[in-house]
Image (cartoon, helix red, strand yellow):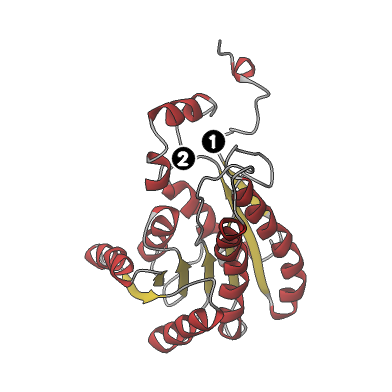
Amino acid sequence: MLTPLKDKTVVVTGGSKGIGKGIARTFAAKGANVAVVARSLTKAMETVTEIQENGGIAHAFEGNVSDLESMKCVANETASTFGGIDVLCANAGIFPNASIEEMTGEQWDQVMDTNARGTLFSLQACLPFLKKAEYGRIIVTSSITGPTTGYAGWSHYGASKAAQLGFMRSAALELARYHITINAVMPGNIMTEGLEGLGEHYLNAMTASVPLKRLGSIEDIAYAALFLASKEAGYITGQTIIVDGGQLLPECLEAMGQN
């Protein structure tokens, strides 16, 4: 059993929907104080209300991860509200579709600013408080897309997710002196609002490629993050956990005994 998170404070960026919302709910259910960060304060409040209705402790903050000053305000207000910051879940991310032939520099920059630079700025903003924590933890939400797989139309997204992992490994060396760990969760196809919008054909095709015969849930990712945030995971840093139902294992559908 993992050490309880009571009195620990967790910052979750992109916490108003999808994987971030699942992370926020799961950490709150395990006793943590949760700072739900999103660009829309109204959407963040919806997550907070849901957490509070289930007996959890949470507070909503409006923040833009691609703006360092915005994230510093979030970190300062979180620490003022809860007394510190123990865990950062750098989860905020976007994945607009754009072919390489048609992609603009603005589209590339928008994805990199949110997904890659947003990870840096979130960490920089929270770092002064993580240094003071009993044990600081940083969990990055990356993806299998980019580091290990590709998907047409998501080249900018894949680049940003691979960038997160390169950043994480060097950051692990710098943060070790403060006894802060940083690790990443690499989700496969997780059933979120964004995935639903890709259509039934996509969902069916992706389900067929997963040995466990289902798409992942946001809780599947949240529990991986929960482990990496635990006291018991204190000797793990600069590492990744792939949570994909075995999607990367088979060479083809026939390898799973399918036609």
- Vertical arrangement, residue 73 with respect to residue 112, above or below: below
Q: Which residue is mark 2?
A: 216
Residue 144 figure quarter: top right
**Coordinates of residue 85 in the picture (x, y in percent):** 50, 80
**Coordinates of residue 137 in the picture (x, y in percent):** 59, 70
* Residue drawn at x 65%, y 25% as measured from the top left: 250
Q: Amino acid at mark 2?
A: Gly
Mark 1, residues whose alpha carbon is within 10 Å: few (<14), some, or many (≥20)? many
- Vertical arrangement, residue 220 with respect to residue 9, above or below: above
Q: Pick out the residue farthest to the left.
A: 53
Res. 10 visible in picture: yes
Label 2–label 1 contact, CB within 8 A: yes
Quadrant location of the C terminus? top right
Q: Secondary structure at mark 2?
A: loop
* Residue drawn at x 52%, y 65% as measured from the top left: 89
First in sequence: mark 2 or mark 1? Answer: 2
Q: Which mark is residue 245?
A: 1
Mark 2, residues whose alpha carbon is within 10 Å: few (<14), some, or many (≥20)? many
Q: Amino acid at mark 1?
A: Gly
